[in-house]
Image: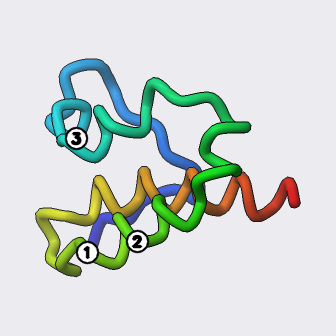
Amino acid sequence: MAGYPLNFGVNAGNSVLNHPLYLKWNMQDIEYVNDNKTALKADIFKIMATNDNMPILWYLTSLYRIVKDLA
């Protein structure tokens, strides 16, 4: 079984880097993410919990965890 480290990090070319939700959130600074964590959480809840979606869930929950830890 393969897992994911606590915080997000992938190599260039990984398919998650082209996911629409990754593209939506990756250009925002942490202040923006903090101010919009309700929208981030809503995006997370819309994702089906399938194996194929684990990379984007990992990315988005990493962002959410960062702003939550900073609060």
Circle 2 Cα neighbour tier, 10 Å, few/some/many (<14 / 14–19 / ≥20): few
Q: Which label number is shown at residue 26?
A: none
- Mark 3 or mark 1: which is in front? 1
**Disc 1 and disc 2: Cα gap in Å?**
6 Å
**Disc 2 and disc 3: Cα gap in Å?**
19 Å
As helix, strand or loop, the secondary structure at mark 1 comes to loop
Q: Which label number is shown at residue 42?
A: 2
At a point 52% along the width and 56% down the height, the residue shown is 5
At a point 40% along the width and 71% down the height, the residue shown is 42
Q: Is residue 37 above or below residue 22?
A: below
Residue 16, position as x, y percentages in the image: 22, 41
As helix, strand or loop, the secondary structure at mark 2 comes to helix
Left or right of 71, for residue 14: left
As helix, strand or loop, the secondary structure at mark 3 comes to helix
- Give the residue at mark 1: 46
Q: Quadrant of the C terminus?
A: bottom right
**Which comes sooner in the sequence, label 3 or label 1?**
3
**Which comes sooner in the sequence, label 2 or label 3?**
3
Disc 3 marks a residue whose amino acid type is Val
